[in-house]
Each structure stands twice: as C-alpha cells, then as structure tokens.
Image (cartoon, rainbow, N blue to C red):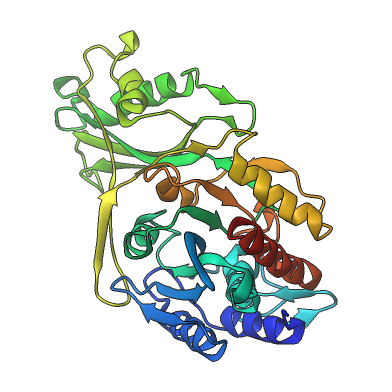
Amino acid sequence: MIQRDRLISFTRDLVRLPSLSGEEDRVAARVQAEMEALGYDRVWTDANGSVAGIIEGARPGKTLLLDAHTDTVGISPGVAWQHEPFGAEVDGDAIYGRGAADMKGALAAMVHAAAASDRSRLQGRVVVSASTMEEVLEGVALQAVMEQTSPDFVVIGEATDLQISRGGRGRAEVHLTTTGRPSHSSAPQLGRNAVLDMMRVIAAVEKLELSTDPLMGPAIFALTDIISEPYPGHSVIPSICKVTYDRRLLPGETVAGVLAPLSTQHELAGIDLKAEIGIGAYRAFTGAQLRCEKFFPAWLLPADDPYVATALGALHAIGLAATTSAYRFCTNAAYSAGVAGVPTIGFGPATEADAHVVDEHLALDDLEAAARGYQAIIAAVLS
C-alpha cells in the first residue's frame, strides 16, 4: 500500500534540494536512499548520475521502465515568488517549490508506486529511472539507463494532468550563420553587412509554411537569439551574424527536412548562409561529458495501440477518467520512442502549464493519484 504521508514527505525532501542540470547529486543521493529503504532489489547510480532501481516480480517476463528526470530549471529574475522556491511548503492542498510539478512529484510517486507493487503477481520487473540532464539534452541520460536495463515498455512521468500521452513534439536547435565582408562603417558600400543579410533570412524563415499535427499542433520555428561579430562593432561593418532557432518537431521530421527549406529560398540567393543543427555538450555532476546533436525527434503511438489501451484500462479501473493526448513539448521519450522505438506513454500529475513557472506547485491529491496510477499501470502491463 502506498503511504500518503511518507510519499508527501519524500516529495518535499526532493523539492528542498536545488538540482540544476549537472548539479543533481543531492537529489540522486536522496532517491537512492529512499529506494534502498523501500526494499528495492537492486539500486545503483550510473556514470551520468542517474539513479536506477529494480523491483523483481515473482515470475520472469517483460521489463517496464518508469522515468522521471531529477534536474530542474532555475529561478528566473523578475516576478517574486510568494512561496520560498526551495521551501517545499504545503499551503492548502498543494506542495509549492521549484520542481514540484516538473517533475519531482512524479519521481516520488514512481519510486513509491513500484515499491508498493505486489511482487507475487508481477511477471517481469519494474525499473524506476531518476535520470539527469533532461532539461538540456532530452533522452541522452535515459539512453544510458535503457542500455543497462533493456526495457520493453516505458512510462515518462512528465505532466499530463493524469491523462495518457501517446506522443510528443520533438525539438531541434537550429543555428544559422550569414557571412559578409567587413569594411569601415563610414563606407558600408565597400563591405557586405552580415546582419542585413540575416534580416532577410529571418524574414524568409518567418514566412515558411510548417506542418500541423491534429494531436500535437503545429511545428514551430522560434527565434531565440541573435549576435553579430565583431562585437562591439566600433566603426566596422559586421562580417558575421548568427541566430538560433528553437524548432519544435512533428512525427517523421528529419534533420535534412528541417534544414532543406532554409537553403532553397529564392529570395536568399547571393547570401552566404550556413544552416546546421547545434551540438550540445554538458558535464554531469559525476564528471561525465554528455555530447550530442540537438535533434530530438517527435514520436506517436496509434490510438489503438495495445500498450495505450492497457494503460488506459488500468487507470479506469482505479477510477481515473483518463483519455489520450500528446505532449506539446519535448521529453525523454524523444529517445525511448523517437530513437529507440520502444513503446512509450506519458503519465504524470500536474499540467504542462505548471512547469517552469513562478510559484510552481503540485496538488497533494494529484500526487497520490499519480502514485496509484503508476501502480495500476505496473500491475496491468506485468500481469
């Protein structure tokens, strides 16, 4: 049986520990200690700092992996919080603090749900993954856990408002560079202004017609930064201009398909333009270096997929009126489903709008409902 008070206490412990990407060590240690105290059959921390714990069923069978990331975004300047960001205060019916919704509540619920499962009825094993670095490299740390455990099915605990997500948009970081020719700014006609060229590129990008998915919504090109070189440009026409786009992906989109339209616009003829996918390189708290191309694909399971049906049936059986939807943002499922092709669903407390916000919070009843939901999914999939 899931112990509500202990679940809430554990969640509050996690929220009290700041854990920016690459700084999740204290949360990892707390998760490992909780798994060991709850009687997991095996618990370890891998080279990237991700913690994994296994609950073995009485009979051999499939492996179900439940994943939640341990890192959070920071506290942005500007609007003040009404609750201490790392106070884990319980005010009314909710826990407040950074990470409560995204996604330490889901992590705590997974840890307790797996431990409370009736092992005598399980055919297979449950793996709970507390993965690192998701906020900067979706799926990279989870890949290592999956390589160690070979799951047949995956549950991602990102917020779904206790519904089932059967797909999710992906993400790409697109870098565009225009190269001009420097000159003295008193004679701009002798050079070629890379910023003016980039302005034409940006105008062309803004006019691109992108696809729309009926479940996930539109693909997106969002400009996130622009810089020129040299900077400061004292009396010099800039010869380099660089911009970054956040490109939200739909199922089936590829690197080539994302970049091709940027180099085939007739109005950009004559511009020296380079388009490429960014490379992400980050250091885990263990010292491990994580590096990959920042292209994290979208994914989608059919509405009638047996795994989706099993999970829905399990939630309905415990009184949760769940339906199916899809994530509008990118998650670790970009690897588990988008790259590895392992059947994956999303299920978690809170809503997408609750992530990364001032006074982030999670309803206590939803925390407990998520734990009961994970327990039900485990029992149904491994029966």
Q: Position of residue 191 (x, y in %)?
A: 16, 24
280 to 133, vertically: above or below = above
**Which of 224/150 is in front?**
150
Residue at (27%, 51%) from the top-left corner? 292
**Which of 168/310 is in front?**
310
86 to 178, vertically: above or below = below
Residue at (24%, 70%) from the top-left corner? 288
Q: Position of residue 92 (x, y in %)?
A: 85, 77
Quarter holding residue 25:
bottom left
Give the residue furthest to the top: 266
Q: Position of residue 179 (x, y in %)?
A: 19, 30
Quadrant where the image shows the N terminus: bottom right
**Which of 53/170 is in front?**
53
Query: Is there any visible trace of residue 1 in the rendered image?
Result: yes
Quarter holding residue 175:
top left
Q: How many marks?
A: 0
Quadrant where the image shows the C terminus: bottom right
**Which of 110/97 is in front?**
110
Residue at (55%, 45%) from the top-left corner? 329
Query: Is there any visible trace of residue 238 in the rendered image?
Result: no
Q: Is residue 113 left or right of residue 264?
A: right
Q: Position of residue 297 (x, y in %)?
A: 41, 39
Residue at (55%, 56%) from the top-left corner? 155
